[in-house]
Image (cartoon, grey):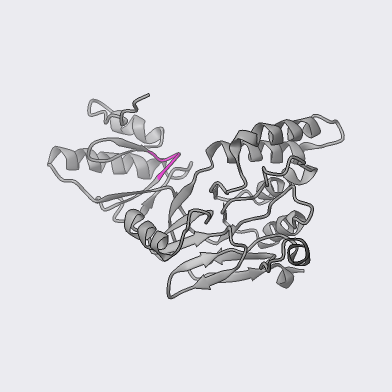
Amino acid sequence: MKRYPRKIFYAGRGWYIAGLKGLAYTSYKTIDLKKKSIICSCQSCQNKPLTFSENTYYDIIRHNLYMMNNIFHGISPDIEVLDIVLQGRTLVLSDIHIGLPHSRVKDAERLIVKLRPDNIVFLGDIIDFDNRQYPNESTAIFEAVNIIDPRVFAGVKGEAEDTRRLYSVLDTAAGIGFDSNYQAPYLLGFITLYKYYRVIRHQLTAYLPDNTRAVFIHGHQIKGSSTIKWLRKELGVEWIFYGHTHRFHIDNREKTVNTGCWLEEEWERKFNNRAVDSGKAVLIEKDGALTEIDYTDYL
């Protein structure tokens, strides 16, 4: 089905109504700020991020009014469209592989609750869809997300997250959820799990607190330095955040970050014959600085 861009309404108070709906004007279409964010150079935005929330209706309406005036005078401000805007402290983690016997999902859950970040980004393989046994912990990480209620909660699809098997996970979770022994936190976690996998993407572009741009991907797409260079050129980003390899690093020179994993190191060494960096995550601070998070520091 061919999709056409949302039209701009020039008549009456169309700009006002669009703003109330979270629709931001560009020179030729509208952007749904419930799904995207923009950086605009118009007189209203002045290169500040414009996002949707109950506190930004006025900002969106004012942006639309200025854009109407710009369109009338043939002025086209620069507008950059991004998936998410991260302001405050952001926790980035990946590769929990819920469903595997050596997943440290409980530790990851405790870390989220202890850190209480403003935003959370998952870099894939949160649930291991390749494993057909889905324990109660399928929703545990999402229950932790509900406890802190982050401003932004987003993620990318991992290699083990074949969404064709999603219904198996949801059916199992629903079967547990309808058991009277399980209370509201589980049911809310189940709903958050469902919403998360409904909107999960292959990659996310983001605005960071220090005014730099980043892309979040799982990492199985990276085939060497050529992929890194291509992503930077194609998406116009400085930082590449990924997981997949289970080996943690923050490289400030190359501007690449790997978030490690949440699998027991001894198990991986004994049964999979590989070393991993377990219990790791990255915290993007309020000023954009990157901090290594090690779960052992929060015991």
Most common secondary structure along the magenta stretch? loop
Is residue 238 in view?
yes
Residue closest to the eye, 58 or 93: 93
Estimate the x, y position of residue 240 in percent, counting from the top left.
Answer: 45, 62
267 to the left or right of 181? left
Name the quarter where the C terminus is drawn: bottom right
Q: In percent of the image, x 42 and y 46: which residue is there?
A: 51
Please count the marks in the image: 0
> Residue 292, relative to residue 31: is it above or below?
below
Q: Residue furthest right?
A: 181
Residue 208 belongs to magenta span: no
Q: Quadrant of residue 63?
A: top left
Q: Quadrant of residue 109?
A: bottom right
Estimate the x, y position of residue 101 in percent, counting from the top left.
Answer: 79, 52
Magenta-drawn segment: 32-36
Estimate the x, y position of residue 92 in percent, counting from the top left.
Answer: 57, 59
Residue closest to the eye, 64 or 82: 82
Q: In percent of the image, x 15 and y 45: which residue is there?
A: 75
141 to the left or right of 23? right
Name the quarter where the N terminus is drawn: top left
Q: In percent of the image, x 73 and y 63: which residue is there?
A: 268
> Residue 217, relative to residue 65: is it above or below?
below
86 to the left or right of 13? right
> Residue 110, relative to residue 26: is it above or below?
below
